[in-house]
Image (cartoon, rainbow, N blue to C red):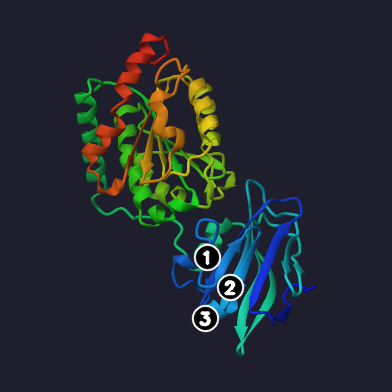
Amino acid sequence: MLRKGENATLDDGRVRIAVDAAGRAVDVSAVLLGDDRRVRSDDDLVFFNHPAQDGVSLDGAGIVIDTERVPGEVSAIAVVASVDGPGTFDGVSVRAGIHGGPGFEAPAMTAGETVVVVVELYRRAGTWKIRAVGQGWASGLAGLATDFGVDVTGEQPAGPGLPERISLRKEAVRVSLEKKGIGGVRARVAVALDASGSMRRMYKDGVVADIVERMAAIALQVDDDGALDAWIFATEFARLPPLRVAEIQAWTRDNVRMHEAVAADGARVSLGGRNNEPQVIADIVSYYAARPGEPVFVLFFSDGGVAKDAQIARLLREASIRPIFWQFVGLGQGRYGILEKLDGLDGRLVDNAGFFAVDDIADITDAELYQRVLSEFPAWLRAAKAQGIPLGSN
């Protein structure tokens, strides 16, 4: 058994490292590093949605490393454990078991760490060795990955044209609403952002940041305080601080990111990377049920992988008595499950949800996007009013 800081030579060219933690579910990942302790590209982060890279692959609760396939420019491979769900590694020992080699139990963390580099494989004089590391990060996987050079923020700095762009988008929303006969509608607007692993490229390329800006223009037009409520979700979810347009650059920098979120109450949430739509749908319903007022227009963005059809259907049926309309938007040609069958969903007081998918939302003009996201909202307003659902000042 290795102690922290100790190392040992690896004889086998193929190594499996299993990772676990007492009392905590963990996600395992690996980072391929060069001599400068940086990744060559974002693809050097191996995790459940990018499960293999250059001889390093995810294998359940472990990492398999075929050292003969690792390129020469990779000098070290960090094996990482992340808390799966809420909580930290405080008081918890993270363990690594090496098949056919020494194990390591890291000392318990004490400072709110949610991610630990457990062990590291590295080249030395033509051989591979393993070092017991046990170093934690309280900033989560996003913080660790950033320190190693992975771009996880998807940040897209706004240029000097931001005020003009927002103004033009708000005007495009106004025109679309007027064409639909609801120019004076008042509503609260919420956005739910998919942050599962498959969304990585859209965050990195700034697509999600631009979606937020485009949806903020809707809130600016129809919400009395101009604020956009926001949720982000993957395996877990967080309700984010409201977005106000004057703060959009800082808000986007702080909140449009994968892996970890800081919720409106200040809590740090490890998002994980799989799809779990029912959790966030239920929280949105609960949040507005406790805050009566204007009707709610939810813009729910996902790139697919929707599998919890029965739970989603039940939640939408139950929510049909509430002043909430759900507009689901598919990003790409993924599997959207029940979302593609909403028109046939029975058992609802009113049809309270719509869905469409686009191949590349960045290629759609503002006018077309607003026409599509607002297309079913007017009919819901009329149906909800006819059924006596309270619609605030409308």
- Out of 341 and 177, give the one closest to the viewer: 341
x, y percent for residue 137: 62, 61
Q: Callout 1: helix, strand or loop? A: strand
How far is mark 2 from mark 1, CA to CA?
Answer: 13 Å
Give the residue type at disc 2.
Ile
Give the residue type at disc 3.
Asp
x, y percent for residue 156: 35, 55
User: How dense is the environment of label 3, judged by Cα within 10 Å: few (below 14), some, or many (20 and up)?
Assistant: few
Q: Residue at x 33, y 43 (%)?
A: 213
Q: Callout 3: helix, strand or loop? A: loop
The residue pinned by badge 1 equals 52
Mark 1 vs mark 3: which is more N-terminal?
3
In what quadrant of the picture does the N terminus appear?
A: bottom right
Camera-nearest label, 2 or 3: 2
Residue 224 badge: none
In which quadrant of the rendered view does residue 266 lie?
top right
Residue 35 badge: 3
Q: Is residue 193 above or below residue 154?
A: above
Q: Would residue 371 be visible to someone looking at this image?
A: yes
The extreme right residue here reads 1
User: How dense is the environment of label 2, judged by Cα within 10 Å: few (below 14), some, or many (20 and up)?
Assistant: many
In what quadrant of the picture does the C terminus appear?
A: top left
Q: Residue at x 45, y 65 (%)?
A: 42
| Left or right placement of residue 15 versus residue 139 in this view | right
- Out of 296 and 66, give the one closest to the viewer: 66
x, y percent for residue 202: 38, 53
Q: Is residue 190 above or below residue 145?
A: above
How far is mark 1 from mark 3, CA to CA?
Answer: 21 Å
The residue pinned by badge 2 equals 77
Q: Residue at x 57, y 43 (%)?
A: 236
